[in-house]
Amino acid sequence: MMDDFGLYPREEPFDPLGVMLFKALQVIAFLFFLALLAVSPDAKEGKIDSKAEFMITLDWPDNHPDDLDLFVQDPAGNIAWYRHREAGFLTLDRDDRGGANDFIMVAGKKIASPIREEIVTVRGILAGEYTVNISHFVATTGEPVTASVKVQKLNPTAQVVFDNKFTLDHTGDEKTAVRFRIDDEGKVVNVDQRPKSLLETFRSGWRNGADLDPRTGVSRNPMRIRRD
């Protein structure tokens, strides 16, 4: 017989415990792989997630030289604007000066930014009415400018509350884009466009003799203040 000379491999005795251990290792390896896939990419070192309930944006044509401003007032009377970027739950995340000093740094070099956009976020729930105004701070071209204002509710899912276009045609021109009211749970319960001047709110306090606004810590007349 050829097997007598050891030409055929002999079968190893069946070991059920060894098979079970091998299968268990396979399961553990598979679960470890799933755990790696489940790790959120947002958990990377150095990345900070900011929570916001609403985002309000103002934008106008790319590369436009004119300077437009976004003003947002909360139910408590706090106003976020370029001289007071944090007010209550309001934060002016981006202040765009049009063609004046609007650039980004790339590899140590200044590159002009074509984007014309200002952003205010609402980072908490305060029930009541919010007023969103836009102002033509510097009309460099002397021509009307069409701007867009959008209000988005971000939680639990993104929802557009308001989106419309407006025309500003001279330095100091101010328009109320929208006034919206939220309840205690952050639900939008009313949206309208009744005019309300926020710049006049500043001017009234200044005319009454107060040098500083207690909610902003700066002059009450923003039209008399130039940017740094």
Image (cartoon, rainbow, N blue to C red):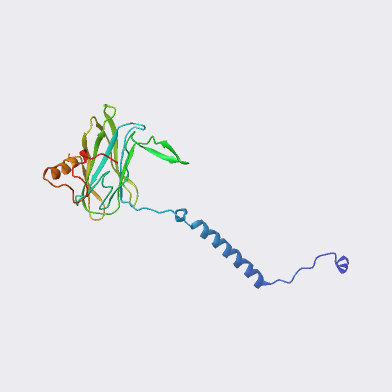
The number of callouts visible is 0
- What residue lies at 21% left-to-right and 36% top-to-bottom? 174
- What residue lies at 80% left-to-right and 65% top-to-bottom? 9
Q: Give the left or right position of residue 55, taking residue 206 as reference.
A: right
Q: Give the left or right position of residue 219, taking residue 61 as reference.
A: left
Q: Give the left or right position of residue 49, taking residue 57 as reference.
A: right
In the picture, the quarter occupied by the C terminus is: top left
Question: How far across and how far down the image is residue 197, in percent?
Answer: 17, 40
Question: How far across and how far down the image is residue 48, in percent?
Answer: 40, 54
Residue situated in front as seen by the camera: 146 or 178: 146
- What residue lies at 66% left-to-right and 71% top-to-bottom? 18
Question: How far across and how far down the image is residue 136, in percent?
Answer: 25, 34
In the picture, the quarter occupied by the N terminus is: bottom right
Question: How far across and how far down the image is residue 97, in percent?
Answer: 32, 37
Residue situated in front as seen by the camera: 121 or 180: 121
Q: Can you tell which quarter of the image residue 61 is in? A: top left
Q: Give the left or right position of residue 79, taking residue 13 as reference.
A: left
